[in-house]
Amino acid sequence: MPGEHPARGRRSTERKGDVRERAILDTCEALLAQKGYDTMTVGDIAQGPGITRGALYFYFGSKQEVVTALVARTVEHLWERSRATAQTDEPREAVAAAMRRTVELWNEHGLVMRTAIDLSLTVPEIGELWSRTADLFTTAITAVLERAGVQPGTEPDQASPMARALCWMIERSFYHASQESRENLQKASSTCEHIWLVSAGLTD
Amino acid sequence: MPGEHPARGRRSTERKGDVRERAILDTCEALLAQKGYDTMTVGDIAQGPGITRGALYFYFGSKQEVVTALVARTVEHLWERSRATAQTDEPREAVAAAMRRTVELWNEHGLVMRTAIDLSLTVPEIGELWSRTADLFTTAITAVLERAGVQPGTEPDQASPMARALCWMIERSFYHASQESRENLQKASSTCEHIWLVSAGLTD
DNA sequence: TATAAAACTCGACGTCGTGTAGACTTTTTT
DNA sequence: AAAAAAGTCTACACGACGTCGAGTTTTATA
């Protein structure tokens, strides 16, 4: 995988390969939408940037590596966005804000997120990436629950495990809804938000 | 797929093929545990009953058909078990009973259920099977919620959508926990039960 | 019980997708 | 200007899938 650090300190002109690599990833994303992971062939991926299979193997060692890089690229974006989110003190508002952000994320990157989830089992690298992402969400939810008065701890009715379950609920609900329509995603979001609030004891 | 109706009315002695077919499915299940779906080859599956690949194709048209049949066999078992469950009137007890039953199901058939979920996207037949199963669970949860006083309806904070979200929460929590250990499955169950109760307004 | 039909099995074949090898061309560095 | 690195290609070998047609065994039937 060449180009590990694309532009460390605005160094050196952009290699031809850098733009190719990006083009490969873009094509991969497009194909994922059209044909799905297993139907899609590395020949297809190579056709995007207009190179041959052989040339593609210069950039990535395998089909799995290509999609792993794509997931990594997307997930990095998610993390960045998570860090850049302002923290609010009012739990009710924090929940609403988190759900808004999550809807945006799924609207933008639903496809890649779904394939990440699908391949988590078979491609360990992707599993690791996604598991880390889920942990991020879970700790965020935990924090909100605790600030809302839920007992901290690891017993089944305390914050950590509840947050984990809520995280899975959101993941799965959004996974399905984002396959259908933006409206359904919005509805699923409202439902999840409601359950989250109730679980936090924030029902009025 | 021969043997559509294994023994309609206790008719005719058992064909040699019937036992083979079962042996194939059993082998498939075992291999699924050892190597996983995509690593496993149809040659491997054929080795179980001690036949060749060619012979296997007499029974099933493809690798996908084999695993689809396996999922069908398992899912049928689930449905049967669901029908045979006594209905209780007390919501709190109904929830507890449902969770107990679900834990048993996942302890017994976790492997096949997980692969069913994994292949839902790529194998439409399996997707259909699992979607029907999820619907069964969802309507059951809906019924309990309504009996507990949750507003019936399809608005985000009413019974149907909430049940769907809870169903996904349970599916995903159990999917992960059943990969780890029986203890974790039990813990996940307790957490899900708690959230379900709170969502139903059954917190004391 | 003889024989026709069906159920079942096999090995060989064609196809497709993957990943590798080595020679060749272009770009960058010195 | 020449060496080194970066990028590209065609051809090949391998493995897995699914098909075919010819055989063998089992079951039904007369």
Image (cartoon, coloured by chain):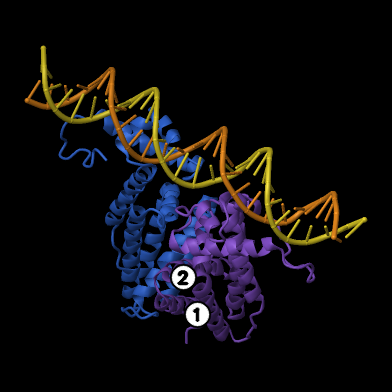
Chain colours: A blue, B purple, C orange, D yellow
> Between residues B115 and C1, which one lies in front from this camera angle?
C1
Q: Residue at x 40, y 78 (%)?
A: B183
| Left or right side of A84 for A188 | right
> Between residues B195 and A55, which one lies in front from this camera angle?
A55
What count of labels does the image hold? 2
Residue A44 seen anywhere in this rendered image of the structure: yes
The reply to whether the C-beta atoms of the residues labelled 1 and 2 are less than 8 Å apart is no
Residue A12 lies, with reference to residue C3, above or below; the image says above
Residue A202 lies, with reference to residue B49, above or below; the image says below
Instruction: Give the percent coordinates (x, y) of residue C21.
Output: 30, 32
| Left or right side of A118 for B68 | right
Question: Could you tell me which quadrant the C terminus of chain A lies in?
Answer: bottom left
Residue A141 lies, with reference to residue A27, above or below; the image says below
> Between residues B203 and A26, which one lies in front from this camera angle?
A26
Residue where numbered disc 2 is placed = B174
Specify which label sits upstream in the sequence, 1 or 2. Answer: 2
Badge 1: few (under 14), some or many (20 or more) residues near its Cα, within 10 Å?
many
Residue where numbered disc 1 is placed = B197
Q: Amino acid at mark 1?
A: Leu
Q: Amino acid at mark 2?
A: Phe
Cα–Cα gap, marks 1 and 2 = 18 Å
Tag 2, which secondary structure? Answer: helix
Q: Chain of mark 1?
A: B
